[in-house]
Image (tube, grey):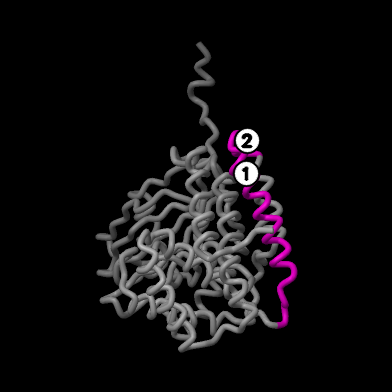
Amino acid sequence: MNYELMTEKFPTINSTLSPEKLGQLIQRKYGLTDKTECNIFRLAMNHLYIVHGNETQYVFRVYTHNWRTKLDIEEELRLLTLLKEAGRQVSFPIADISNSFIQEIEAPEGKRFGVLFSYAKGIKTAKFSAETSFLIAQALAKVHQSAENTVLRRISYNAQNLLKDPVLKIKNFYNKNRSEVEFLENLADFLTLKIENTDQQNMRHGVVHFDVWFDNLHIDSEKEITFFDFDFCGNGYLCFDISYFLFQLLATHLNEEEYQIKADSFIKGYETVTTMNAEEKKLVPLACLAIMIYYISVQCDRFDYWTNIFLNEDHLKRMVGNLKRWIAYNKIEIN
């Protein structure tokens, strides 16, 4: 028997940090009371912990190893600080007692980064009224006003990284789903032409959240909207966020009449703050399709770090089914 092999530490790729030990670290770093509590909230693309300390609730995000660079995170936090200072309702980073925002944690797999965020007031729900849809859009438009013409040292979303590269990853991962992959390849070719032929001069550019849907916002008393989880923020067309929200709204509403009422209310709410021009409105039905292709590829790319039983052939069929439903609803003709 090889006792040496039995006692050596085995390499890992994605560990779960002890909430008890992490709570002690947070208590010490942020000057919280000895009654500080830390509990696992969600282990997904990143690991989230709920922290109770000094009679206040926080969220501590531990980024997956090799998911974001320190610069990526610094730029995300710079954006959130900018939005907070502009009075926008976002979950913002909390500095520790040494005025640092990012904690470096030596996990078994290597260095991981952690950030403490304010907790967004309210609740998360997919069942909201048309009036609330109006308010979500107003809040998003105000975020866009502050983010317009801002540039982060992070990804700039374009046809290459949204469509061309992702399709190759999807094709490699889902090598048995030939019909679905062929559909995505044809859709990607169609969308690439549309995006590359967009009139750049008539598009509002800036920093986009890129994941705006009910799962990443809280609603307080159906009046106050707070956005969080800017992990995918980057540079791009502001209408990306509008398109993605509407796509997710349709995906969570089987009643299409109800969807249309909320979608109309959303657009109306957005344009009470700032308007979209005709070129942007032309891209809104198409942009979300590119984003969804990108996110399918992210799931494939991060499978080893975020293994889920749902990530299988049936999952891809469901995802493609949602894309086809959106295409049919919007009467999009793919040439």
- In the image, 47 versus 301, the foreground residue is 301
Image coordinates of residue 230 in percent, x first then y, are: 50, 66
Main secondary structure type of the part rendered in magenta: helix
Which residue is depicted at the point 53% across and 36% down?
Answer: 12
Residue 175 image label? 2
Q: Is residue 12 left or right of residue 151?
A: left
Query: Which amino acid type is shown beneath numbered disc 1?
Result: Val
What's drawn in magenta, residue-wise? 172-201
Residue 181 image label? 1
Image position of 150 with respect to 2: above or below: below
Asked if the magenta segment contains residue 175, the reply would be yes
Image coordinates of residue 163 in percent, x first then y, are: 67, 56
Query: Which amino acid type is shown beneath numbered disc 2?
Result: Asn
Residue neighbourhood size for the residue with mark 2, other residues' Cα within 10 Å, grouped as few (<14), some (14–19), many (≥20): few
Q: Is residue 201 left or right of residue 134?
A: right
| SS for dot 1 | helix
Asked if the magenta segment contains residue 182, the reply would be yes
- In the image, 29 versus 235, the foreground residue is 235
Q: Quadrant of the C terminus?
A: bottom right
Image position of 172 with respect to 275: above or below: above
